[in-house]
Image (cartoon, grey):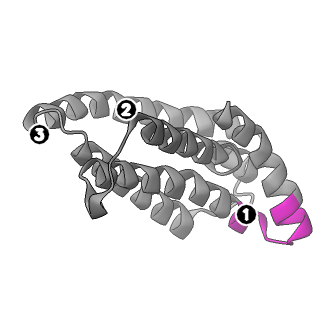
Amino acid sequence: VAAAVASVSAGAICDRVLVGWAGLPLTRARKVMQGIACVGPGAAMVSLALLASGVAGLELNQNTAQAIFVGALACQSFSAAGFGCAAQDISRRYSSLLYGSTSAVSVVVGAFGQYFTGVILDLTDRDFSAMFYLTGAVELCGVLMFTAWWNSERTFE
């Protein structure tokens, strides 16, 4: 439910608040939305790993873990107004081809990710902390790359 509400709200926040009211250029607004979509889940995964290790004497319980995951899903849904609609910014005519191509690459990477997750869990005696740290690092790399290289200017028809 949190992800659905965030996903629907993300477009209005981006277009009406960031671009309309705050006057941000569309490129910067997309970067802000994608930043929320990457930094939120990345921080959540690192938090889960730290809390599971008992840092600062804190203990991770099921309710806290669930709340952190719900927050991560809500943040990730802001991608709907970031990368999710970015292909439409650079090309109206070919946006479906662009989005489909990037999705195909993501599916292949995701399939390998499942295998490597199993390998890592086998090597760490099913300790998810390594996966949480790795996921946080991937999210950080994603936001850095999107922020550095994305441009919403119309590139071609």
Residue at 74% across, 52% down = 89
Residue 90 vertical position relative to residue 107 in the rendered view, above or below = below
**Left/right of residue 125 with respect to residue 144 in the rendered view:** left
Q: Is residue 57 visible?
A: yes
Q: Is residue 94 visible?
A: no
Q: Give the residue type at disc 3.
A: Thr
N-terminal of the two: label 3 or label 1? 1
Are the residues flagged by discs 3 and 1 in contact, CB closer than 8 Å?
no
Label 1 to label 2: alpha-carbon separation? 27 Å
Q: Give the residue type at disc 1.
A: Ala
Q: Quadrant of residue 149?
A: bottom right
Residue pointed to by mark 2: 110
Asked if residue 23 lies in the magenta stretch, the reply is: yes
N-terminal of the two: label 2 or label 3? 2
Residue pointed to by mark 3: 124
Is disc 3 placed on a helix, strand or loop?
Answer: loop
Q: Which residues are magenta?
A: 17-29
Q: Quadrant of residue 125?
A: top left
Residue pointed to by mark 1: 29
x then y, percent, for residue 53 = 23, 51
